[in-house]
Image (cartoon, coloured by chain):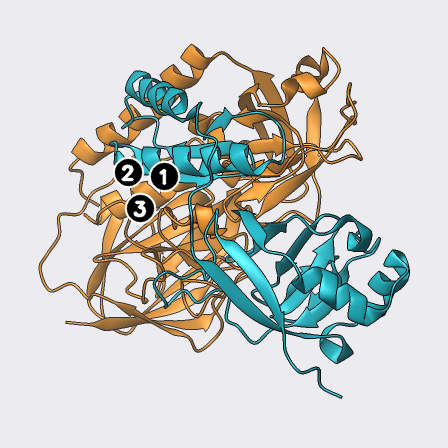
Amino acid sequence: MLLIELEPVIDPVINERAIMLASRLRARRARGIRDVAPGYCTVGVHFDPLHTDLAALEQAIETEFDSLASLEAIADRNVIDIPVSYGGAGGPDLDTVASFAGCTPAEVIARHSGRTYRVYMLGFVPGFAYLGRVEQSIAAPRHRVPRERVPAGSVGIAGLQTGVYPVESPGGWQLIGRTTTVMFDPNRDPSSLLAPGDAVRFVPVETRA
Amino acid sequence: MMGELVVIKPGLLTTVQDLGRYGHQAFGVPAAGPMDAFSHRLANQLVGNDVDAATLEITLLGPELIVEADTTMAIAGAQFEVACDDRPVALNSSFTIQKGQRLKFGRIVEGARAYVAVAGGIQTDPVLGSRATHLVSHAGGFRGRALMSGDRLPIAGDSGARPLRKSGGLTLPSKGRALLRVMAGPQADWFEADALKTISGVSFRISPQSNRMGYLLQGPPLVRSREGELISEPLGLGAIQVPSAGEPILLMADRQTAGGYPKIGYVISADLPLAGQLAPGDFIEFHLCSQPEAVAALIARERQLLRYADLKGTS
């Protein structure tokens, strides 16, 4: 894999450039390129070394990189609403986050659902999107010991990041709610509800008693 | 004509694999695929399949299968003792098998993983364009899991006679020790200046917690020269990442798509099949190499496969 490094920062504009660079390289459909995946501020190019013209690939990267250097605006993308039932059995850490923030659980819900998040990247498991940024006051750190099983649909906070667990998996994030939205389905096209660069809002729904 | 492979005993860890699920890593979908892609491709080549056709990956303790079709098969990779009914089966050679015959894996002599190819490939339903099994996300292969007794895998069946071939195979690591050549990784400079040299020529033991995602390596800790967290970034096959405790992890077929540990190096593509032939308790010695060496090694590896494709031997 060839790794392209932009500036080592978590920043929407740098991230936008990484996403655009990945999508332009993918669109070239050059022989030997197996996959192109953007990170926060990097792009991974998976290639078959025997069928790839490396000099041409490096030239393509340079050309696209240069043409993106002046990109400052973030493309408008669809805003995806994710309904969340906060607290209760689906959000066992809501009170913990509230005491971390020194506020009421209702205020945590208001702060978490009160802003639009950016999908910086996907990873960990299929369809798991790293969303940022969480408001500083509720940016509670991960659990020191991760849970062995976090149910699918759990909405969590880990520092300045938030996200939804697409499938049951181990996980250390602070769980504040749950959604019934299917984040990933390999038989759906596209399989992942969220793509890099998308905008996401969490919408509180009636909390079960 | 369709047939089936019926699993009588599954073995330790038998999975359906093709060359991997590529094109979806931007959505966090891992590639999976064979741990030893060379032997997977060789097995396919021996039965006249496309190299991407799905095979069975056999691990350490092999399965017992009944083949419900007349077909052509081949086994490559680890050196197992294999019998078809009571007749021994040669490795790295294609052979015909009749409907109802039993393929039984016995003792493993060298290596860790073998690949069973069947004419036309294993015909489980592809998921996102691939039949590779990813165990952690339960995707692909046969119901997203390792095979179990009673499973029935669809195979093409093979009416036409295919030419029987035999060839050499991968030179397996001897006595559970492999030399793997490495190149500097993107965060090589996060470690003390001689850390890359430190890993050269030192033996690391593959810990029992290792699996298809990666090998946890026990050996001298690699000392970081700078603090700070790496911003999570895409991961490639063969990356050697170093968590804070300092013991490296060699990332294998089922690795996640991205991660936040610094990567001191990468095992070169030509040597990845050798890594796939190791098991917990085995030893790895890394050797630093240059990019031209890595390219030359890969070309040599591919020439080996091409040479085998030209052999028309009988068995």
Query: Relative to residue A99, is residue A136 depicted above or below?
Result: above
Contact between marks 1 and 2 (CB within 8 A): the answer is yes
Residue A23 has which mark?
1
Q: Chain of mark 3?
A: B
Q: In the displayed image of the protein, which residue is found farthest to the left?
A: B160
Query: Could you tell me which quadrant the C terminus of chain A lies in?
Result: bottom right
Instruction: Specify whether B39 is left or right of B123.
Output: right
Please name whichever residue, B69 or B212, is drawn nearer the observer in this view of the structure: B212
Judge left or right: residue B96 versus residue B66: left
Dot 1 surroundings within 10 Å: few (below 14), some, or many (20 or more)? some
Q: Is residue B300 visible?
A: no
**What amino acid is found at the position of numbered circle 3 in the picture?**
Ala
Q: Are circles 3 and 1 on residues that touch, CB within 8 Å? A: no
Q: Amino acid at mark 1?
A: Ser
Measuring from the top left, give residue A108's x and y in whole percent. Answer: 78, 64
* Cβ atoms under marks 2 and 3 closer than 8 Å: no
Picture quadrant where residue B298 is located: top left
Residue B177: image location, x then y, percent:
60, 30
Q: Nearer the viewer, residue B200 or A201?
A: A201
Q: Which residue is mark 3?
A: B43
Quarter where residue B270 is shown? top left
Chain A: its colour in the image is: cyan
Secondary structure under tag 3 reads: helix
Q: CA distance from mark 2 to mark 3?
A: 33 Å
